[in-house]
Amino acid sequence: MINPEIENYCINHSTRPSQDVQSIGAFTKEGVHGSQMLIGEMEASVLAFLINMAKVKTVLELGTYTGYSALAMAEQLPEDGKVITIDINKETSAIARRFWDQSPHGKKIEQILKPGLEALSGIEGQFDLIFIDADKNNYSNYLTWALNHLSDHGLIVVDNTLWHGKVLTPGADKQTDSIIQHNETARDLEGYVKTLLPVRDGMFLIQKKQR
Ligand SMILES: C[S@@+](CC[C@H](N)C(=O)[O-])C[C@H]1O[C@@H](n2cnc3c(N)ncnc32)[C@H](O)[C@@H]1O
């Protein structure tokens, strides 16, 4: 979506994730299937900014993969902060835990190995940041859950909401239509401020109106 040189320039002038997070990125790119799914440094810096700005203490993430985004968020939290992250993939979740165990921030992360909807049905309470980055066909269901579990000053961030530009072609496939449906629901929410940022593959930010 953006000239790679410009994106690198932005990354080089933004808060960067730690060496521990970068090691997850390097390991994943070297040999894990699907490494294009990593949020990368540009999105990590946006999340870091939001976590700081909204004084986030509790995070719920859908889509752990190899643990890059979970650790990037955990290291921005205070000592008593917590990330709960959910994924169905045993192998990539094990890679994540291995890397987190080498970081002083890894202890803030709790991992749930279950399908997203099943995991969410067992989670109560409210979260300051809910990051949706798992199976696209459930985006609307995840949004519904997130709206019901968001703290008053909390934020929902939904990744891949431009879906490589395919949101401009309804009917292209099931995942595209699911993301389009989610985006329309998010757009029409009342009592919330929303912005769909063209950062990487699209970051949809949603927050309850504060005034
Ligand atoms: C885009 S990746 C997450 C990337 C990660 N947030 C990062 O940047 O480091 C999506 C993940 O969603 C997981 N996933 C797919 N379907 C799922 C489901 N039904 N429930 C939970 N996780 C699912 C996949 O196993 C994959 O690891």
Image: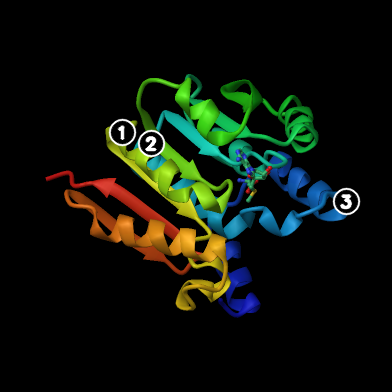
Q: Amino acid at mark 2?
A: Trp
What residue did someone put label 3 on?
31
- Compared to residue 135, the image places residue 114 above or below, namely above
Q: Residues within 10 Å of mark 3 (few under 14, many from 20)?
A: few
**For the C terminus, which image quadrant?**
top left
Residue 11, numbered label: none
Closest to the observer: 4 or 206? 206
Say what secondary structure mark 3 lies in: helix
Mark with earlier residue (1, 3): 3
Q: What percent of the width, then of the height, locates residue 194?
A: 29, 57
Q: CA distance from mark 2 to mark 1?
A: 5 Å
Label whose residue precedes the other's in the sequence (2 or 3): 3
Up-down: is 15 above or below 174? above
Location of residue 103 in the rendering, given as x and y in whole percent from the top left corner: 70, 29
Q: Is mark 1 within 8 Å of ligand 1?
A: no
Viewer-side residue, 7 vs 68: 68
- Ligand 1 is found in which quarter of the picture? top right
* Three-letter amino acid code of the residue under disc 1: Asn
Q: On the rendered structure, is 199 left or right of 71? A: left
Note whether residue 15 is visible.
no
Q: Which residue carries the number 2 mark?
A: 145
Label 2 close to label 1 by CB (< 8 Å): yes
So how many labels did they put on this image? 3
Q: In the picture provided, is 49 more to the left or to the right than 53?
A: right
Question: Mark 1 highlights which residue?
Answer: 148
Examine the rendering and report whether any part of residue 113 can be seen.
yes
